[in-house]
Each structure stands twice: as C-alpha cells, then as structure tokens.
C-alpha cells in the first residue's frame, strides 16, 4: 500500500517482536501508536475508528472498539493475534454492509408493530421529565412501573437519575457526546468517473482534515442505491465534524460549500450535485473516554444499590453501534425479568 512510507512500514513491522503493552492506558490512539507507530495510527486506525464513532482516538476507550480490546488483552502481539483470529473466523456469508432499503426506522417500526400486536402499550412523543420512587416501584411522569429501563443518552439520563442516585447521576453528567452533520448529494452520471464506481469511499486523516471526515460512495456501498444505467448518476454521503469539531450549529450554506469544495479537492474535480439533503445529528455519538468500562460498572452498581429496578442501556454504555444496542436491550430485558421475578421464554 502507498498509504504508509517505507519508514512507516518498517516501524509497523516491528510490532510482532515488541513486548506486551497491556490495556491499562485504555486509549485506542496510545495503544496503536505504541504498537505500530505514528503512521499506522494517523493514516489507518484514527481515520477509520474516528469516522465510525466521530471520535478522537487518543481520547477514546478501548471498550468502544472491542475487537482491538480483545486483541490487546489476550495477545502479546496484536498483529499475530489478529492473523490467528482471521484464520479461525468462518468465511463471511453475505455482504459486509446491510440496511433495510426502506430506511432504518423500519427496524423500530416493525418492533413497535409486533409489540402492539402482543398487547403492549407504547407512548411516543412524550418526554420523560421525572422518576419518583413509589412503594416497590417507580412513577415515570406519574405512571406506575415495576422497573424502568432508561435507553436515553447518558447526558439526558443524568438529571433523571440524579435525585434517585447522586453517584450515578454525577458520573452520567460527565459523559461527552459528539455531533456530526451528513450531506447526501446526487451527482449526474457524467460527473462521476467510471473507475470510482468500484470503490466504497475514503476517510480523511486528521493532519489534512478540515471539516469533512469521510465520504462514502453510497451507490457503490448500498445495493438499493446502485445506478441502473450510467445516466442514473451516483449518491455520495459526506460526513462533517467529530469530537472536538462540532459543526451542528453552522449554517447550511457554509456546510454545503465546505463539503463540496473539500470533496472536490479530494476527488480531483468539481462536484455538480443535482440534489442534496443536509442532516444534523447533534450529540449523536457518545464518546467513551479512557476508563469508560469502569465508569459504566460504577453507574450500574450505584443504581443497583440506590435505585433497584432502574436500568440504563443504549449507545452510551456498552457499545455504540446498532448490534451492540440490541444486545444491551436483550440483557436489560433479562435484568428486568430477574428483578420482577418472571422467566423469559
Ligand atoms: C449519522 C449516523 C450514522 C450511523 N451509522 C451507523 C451504522 O452504519 N451502523 C451502526 O451500527 N450504527 C450507526 N450509527 C449509530 C447508531 O445509530 C446509534 O448508536 C444508535 O441508534 C443508538 O441507539 P440508542 O437507542 O442508544 O440511542 P438513540 O437512537 O439516540 O435513542 C435515544 C432515544 O431517546 C429519546 N429521548 C431522549 N430524551 C428523552 C426523554 N427525556 N424522554 C423520552 N425519550 C427521550 C430520543 O428521542 C431517542 O429516540 C450511526 C449514527 C449516526 C448519527
């Protein structure tokens, strides 16, 4: 690969002979730099992890990237460990990326539909303002519940639990969340070189980063956005902002101009979109600072002691992506079932 210089490659090649580093520092950036050198961190791992989680990897806990955490915790060399894991892994059965072609809301809409069909009442468009103790249970906005699962972001959860568990509330209040902006653009077919159609996009390393952190060639990535004819054109999704660079308050025209100008420079020609959609995601990505797992354990312990029957789950705690959130939802359901004494089938 041309991504690394020869000195960068030689430094990375030393990794298998280094003594174990351990995971004590709990920083993705520090671990990768120590093991593989500055270039692997700056040009590969920081852009990749940073763009997935809108993170600054130097201030990002290993518990946010469990694949790296497992490799570092269980192997002297990450590279040897990764090779071993790859040999053992079953071959990928389907495509790397998957999404409902009708939009991500299909997941939650389908879940809501199936719950309602089983007799569950769901109330939406209603902000939880208060939780009070009531006998053996809790009053949520005045309605009784045996147990409560707060699946809200940590910063929102903090004032709700602070009156019930000051320790949990204080820890939750310290969580940081990063905002991002997505610009989705449609380009006519003659504004997109044919040799780019086989690529899925690119990431921008911090030393050359301005506002754009990544551009996804969405028509190459998602089957339902693939052009049927060359005239159909392509769709790009441009990500702007990250932890330490919150752009969600910037006006539309500044964001669009910056995105088109920066991406134009990256790909080497002027972009002439026919349509665009700008989406702001304020405080959407929880930032797992070093020591995150210990803090989450502290919150759970404080709640179990001070406010039994109150549970937290969601992206702020044990994994940011959707699969991790679903796993947390399942274990919260098991926790609630155990607490109220029912057996889940
Ligand atoms: C641009 C972008 C792209 C992403 N891409 C991917 C991807 O490709 N793959 C992937 O796995 N993940 C992706 N993610 C991450 C993933 O979408 C989130 O991490 C996940 O949706 C978090 O789920 P959650 O339920 O924990 O939190 P949220 O989805 O933030 O839900 C929290 C809910 O709490 C509600 N709420 C807040 N306050 C209150 C209150 N006081 N009372 C009642 N309700 C309240 C909010 O309205 C919201 O519905 C992406 C995220 C973004 C922003």
Image (spheres, rainbow, N blue to C red):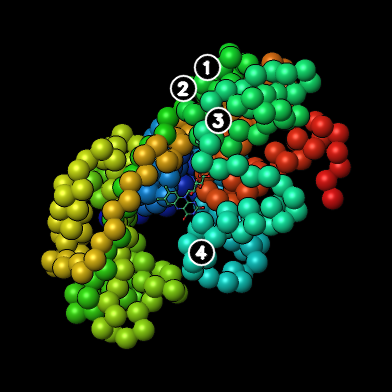
Can residue 135 be seen here?
yes
Q: Secondary structure at mark 1?
A: helix
Alpha carbons under labels 2 and 4: distance apart: 33 Å
The crowd level at tag 1 (other Cα within 10 Å; few <14, some 14-19, many 20+) is some
Mark 1 lies on residue: 170
Tell me the distance, in whole angstroms, between the alpha carbons under discs 4 and 1: 37 Å
Find disc 3 in the rendering and name its residue. 128
- Reading the image, the residue beneath label 2 is 174
Of residues 161 and 74, the one drawn nearer to the viewer in this rendering = 161
Question: In the image, is the residue at mark 3 within 8 Å of ligand 1 by its beta carbon?
Answer: yes
Instruction: Report whether 13 appears left or right of 202.
Output: right
Label 3 element class: loop
* Observer able to see residue 75: no
Pointer 1 with pointer 2, Cβ within 8 A = yes
Say which label, 2 or 4, has the lower sequence index: 4
Where residue 99 is drawn, which disc sits there? 4
> Which dot, 1 or 3, sits closer to the camera?
3
């Amino acid at each position: 690969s041309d991504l690394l210089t020869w000195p960068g490659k030689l430094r990375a090649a030393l990794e298998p002979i280094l003594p174990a580093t351990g995971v004590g520092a709990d920083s993705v950036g520090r671990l990768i730099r120590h093991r593989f050198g500055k270039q692997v961190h700056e040009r590969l791992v920081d852009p990749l992890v940073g763009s997935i989680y809108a993170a600054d990897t130097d201030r990002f806990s290993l518990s946010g990237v469990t694949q790296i955490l497992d490799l570092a915790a269980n192997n002297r060399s990450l590279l040897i460990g990764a090779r071993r894991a790859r040999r053992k892994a079953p071959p990928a059965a389907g495509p790397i990326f998957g999404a409902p072609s009708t939009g991500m809301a299909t997941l939650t809409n389908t879940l809501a539909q199936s719950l309602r069909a089983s007799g569950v009442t769901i109330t939406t468009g209603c902000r939880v303002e208060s939780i009070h103790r009531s006998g053996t249970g809790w009053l949520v906005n005045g309605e009784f519940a045996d147990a409560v699962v707060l699946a809200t972001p940590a910063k929102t959860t903090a004032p709700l639990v602070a009156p019930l568990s000051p320790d949990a509330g204080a820890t939750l209040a310290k969580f940081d969340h990063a905002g991002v902006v997505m610009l989705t653009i449609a380009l006519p077919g003659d504004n997109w070189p044919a040799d780019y159609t086989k690529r899925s996009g690119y990431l921008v390393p911090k030393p050359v980063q301005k506002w754009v952190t990544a551009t996804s060639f969405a028509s190459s990535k998602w089957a339902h956005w693939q052009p049927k004819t060359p005239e159909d054109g392509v769709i790009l999704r441009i990500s702007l902002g990250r932890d330490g660079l919150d752009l969600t308050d910037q006006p539309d025209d500044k964001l669009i101009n910056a995105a088109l100008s920066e991406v134009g420079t990256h790909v080497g020609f002027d972009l002439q979109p026919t349509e665009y959609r700008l989406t702001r995601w304020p405080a959407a990505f929880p930032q797992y600072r070093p020591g995150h797992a210990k803090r989450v354990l502290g919150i759970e312990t404080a709640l179990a002691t001070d406010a039994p029957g109150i549970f937290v789950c969601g992206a702020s705690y044990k994994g940011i992506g959707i699969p991790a959130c679903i796993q947390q939802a399942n274990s919260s359901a098991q926790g609630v079932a155990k607490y109220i004494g029912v057996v889940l089938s």
